[in-house]
Amino acid sequence: MEKIALYVHIPFCKQKCFYCDFHSFQGIENIMDRYTDALIAEINRKAHKYEIKTIFIGGGTPTYLHLNLFEKLLKCIGDLKLCEDVEYTVECNPGTLSNEILEIMKENKVNRLSIGLQACQDNLLKVIGRIHNYKEFEENYYLARSKGFSNINIDLMYGLPGQKVGHWEESLKEIVKLKPEHISAYSLIVEEDTVFYRWYEQNKLNLPSEDEEREMNELTHTLLKEAGYEQYEISNYAKPNRECRHNLVYWNMEDYLACGTGASSYINGTRYKNLSNLDKYMEAMENNLEEYEEVIENSREDNIEEFIFMGLRKLDGISEEDFRVRFGATIDEIFSDIIEKHIKEQLLIRENGRIFLSKKGIELSNYVMSDFMLA
Ligand code: SF4
């Protein structure tokens, strides 16, 4: 049986955060029931032919689903053929974890939680539109630990409006004290179609300067390294052997099946994007129709580009042998000039059959990666 990673998308949030452009909505709780049934129909139709090696239920806020629906979904996933050592993550928002929901997760084999905290200062949480405060996060975190969850990720974000270097330092230090197994530290990107984008255009977003942001980035490396976290991807840090295996599937360009509205699968070199329109998605699933918003058969060039872009996000970069096996050509046959140029600029390093970004290269990763475009 072929092994695959499974992503499951829950598009509900209690309130939309001001920076968020994910496919998620507030105020549509009335369709939770119908959506869950449609999602279960899709999972049952597509996932039984695989053995599932990792699962990630994301969104949106999966833990915002009504408890009975959440349990129904987890039972459906639990009936799939899961690998013995499956990594099974649920994304949670602080303030949404209770005894009941944690017990449901435990009973249904969830073994990893990813908690979106973002910052430790209540005023900053408010500025970015989060609905929880730090205390609620801490209570939820300890509750999860007391229920035996021994693999927890915490998401943090820097470059926030009004955030000073001192705030970021405080957030990192506070979180490190809690000893989560994994920390994601993203810098804020102001995306179109968000409240922040509107404010940005109106010059109302008081973002940190480039220098401050660079300092925050530096602090992240230093403090997390001191605390025993290994950076293994541009924005991700883990204790030994606690890297997120599900995300590594994306970065290694392995196959994954994604269920839910707007979710994209990648199977045998083809991308299948599910219907983003909620009504159309639910209707298609209810009628057992295999309908997609887009099906794109990646060209060899697309696959090569994606392999490089995704691979260079990892600190250990790209394996030259993997490249050769996948594409039937050595990486030098296609990119020797570019590789040489960036090695000279000390942005890329070539060592023991791998090519990866240097420290300076990570800072300038967009510049390096753009050179690998084939079109
Ligand atoms: S909770 Fe997560 S998915 Fe929902 S709006 Fe906020 S960042 Fe976006």
Image (cartoon, rainbow, N blue to C red):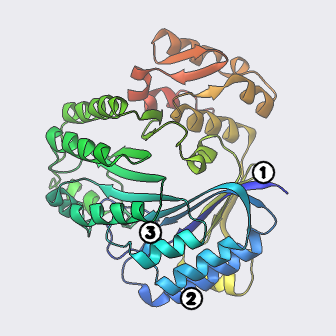
Residue 320: x %, y % from top left: 70, 23
- Disc 3 crowd rating (10 Å Cα; few below 14, some 14-19, many 20+) is many
Side of 266 where 229 appears, left or right: left
Nearer mark to the viewer, of 2 and 1: 2
Nearer mark to the viewer, of 1 and 3: 3
Vertical relation: 78 (above or below) 254: below
Vertical relation: 170 (above or below) 111: above
Instruction: Using the numbered discs, state the Cα–Cα distance from disc 2 to disc 1 in whole angstroms.
Output: 31 Å
- Residue nearest the viewer, comparing 177 with 366: 177
Q: Amino acid at mark 2?
A: Arg
Mark seen at residue 134: none
Q: Which residue is mark 2?
A: 34
Residue 184: x %, y % from top left: 40, 46
Q: Residue shown at 21%/39% (left/top)?
A: 169
Residue 42: x %, y % from top left: 69, 76
Q: Secondary structure at mark 3?
A: loop
Mark seen at residue 268: 1
Instruction: Using the numbered discs, state the Cα–Cα distance from disc 1 to disc 3 in whole angstroms.
Output: 27 Å
- Residue nearest the viewer, comparing 294 with 352: 352
Q: Quadrant of ligand 1?
A: bottom left
- Residue nearest the viewer, comparing 228 with 205: 228
Vertical relation: 109 (above or below) 192: below
Q: Amino acid at mark 1?
A: Asn
- Disc 1 crowd rating (10 Å Cα; few below 14, some 14-19, many 20+) is few
The answer to whether any part of residue 106 appears in the image is yes
Q: Amino acid at mark 3?
A: Gly
Q: Which residue is mark 3?
A: 60
Q: Residue shown at 29%/65% (left/top)?
A: 139
- Disc 2 crowd rating (10 Å Cα; few below 14, some 14-19, many 20+) is some
